[in-house]
Image (cartoon, rainbow, N blue to C red):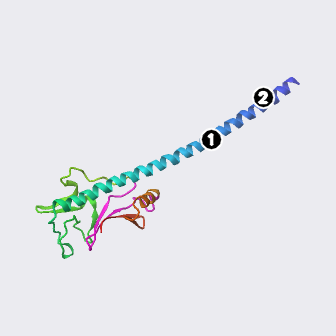
């Protein structure tokens, strides 16, 4: 009889140990999920911060172009434009091909005398796209590498730049100059 009582007690103790292990597993899974969400949120915030810095660098290069070479003429739209413009149909091009009109010929924005290289686009996005509108406005587009991608980043950027950014499908369009 003592043997049966000991076996019952052992089973009772084993069930509490298994119950405790199960609780630890549930708490561990919840913590892991919380930690993953936190890391994803931090990654999105890092990308938003990177976009903000890149946007300021590119804007600075555009304004520097107009300040250093105010008499630039691309012959676009039959008017003079001191701002850089891509030499493509529709006046839209990736930022690395945009040139500033200098007296000695076009000068890439990456080679401007500020000594700052053009930024490499954030990991979830293609290279920045520059638009010089017919009305003389300048826009910068940020296009996700994957259709529908970087949704959380887009939402944060829309909140951060409310009034100066709009969406065009999945793309973000930042107004640099109206």
Q: Position of residue 108 (x, y in %)?
A: 20, 58
**Residue pushed farthest right?**
1
Q: Quadrant location of residue 16?
A: top right
Residue 21 vertical position relative to residue 171 in the rendered view, above or below: above
The question of residue 88 being in magenta is answered with no
Look at the numbered discs 2 and 1 and tell me whether their residues touch, using CB distance below 8 Å: no
Residue 50 vertical position relative to residue 26 in the rendered view, above or below: below
Q: Nearer the viewer, residue 4 or 55?
A: 55
Q: Position of residue 60 (x, y in %)?
A: 26, 57
With 101 as the anchor, is 20 left or right in this view? right
The question of residue 134 being in magenta is answered with yes
Q: For the point 40% across and 53% down, which residue is it?
A: 48
SS of the residue at dot 2? helix
Q: Magenta segment, which residues?
A: 124-151
What residue is shown with label 1? Answer: 27
Q: Nearer the viewer, residue 65 or 124?
A: 65
With 30 as the anchor, is 120 left or right in this view? left
Q: Nearer the viewer, residue 80 or 172?
A: 80
Residue 111 vertical position relative to residue 86 in the rendered view, above or below: above
Q: Position of residue 37 (x, y in %)?
A: 52, 48
SS of the residue at dot 1? helix
Q: Main secondary structure of the magenta part?
A: loop
**Residue pushed farthest top?**
2
Q: Position of residue 143 (x, y in %)?
A: 37, 61
Disc number lying in front (2 or 1): 1
What residue is shown with label 2? Answer: 10
Q: For the point 42% across and 64% down, which residue is it?
A: 170
How many angstroms separate mark 2 from mark 1 (CA)?
26 Å
């Amino acid at each position: 009889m003592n043997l049966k009582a000991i076996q019952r007690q052992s089973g009772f103790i084993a069930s509490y140990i298994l119950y405790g292990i199960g609780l630890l597993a549930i708490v561990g899974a919840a913590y892991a999920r919380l930690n993953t969400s936190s890391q994803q949120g931090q990654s999105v915030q890092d990308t938003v911060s990177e976009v903000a810095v890149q946007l300021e660098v590119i804007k600075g290069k555009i304004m520097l172009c107009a300040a250093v070479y105010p008499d630039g003429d691309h012959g676009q739209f039959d008017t003079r434009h001191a701002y850089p413009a891509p030499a493509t149909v529709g006046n839209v091009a990736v930022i690395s091909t945009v040139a500033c009109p200098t007296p000695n010929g076009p000068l890439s924005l990456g080679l401007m005398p500020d000594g700052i290289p053009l930024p490499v686009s954030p990991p979830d996005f293609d290279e920045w796209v520059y638009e010089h509108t017919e009305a003389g406005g300048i826009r910068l587009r940020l296009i996700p590498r994957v259709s529908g991608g970087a949704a959380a980043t887009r939402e944060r950027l829309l909140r951060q730049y409310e009034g100066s950014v709009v969406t065009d499908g999945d793309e973000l369009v930042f107004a640099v100059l109206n």
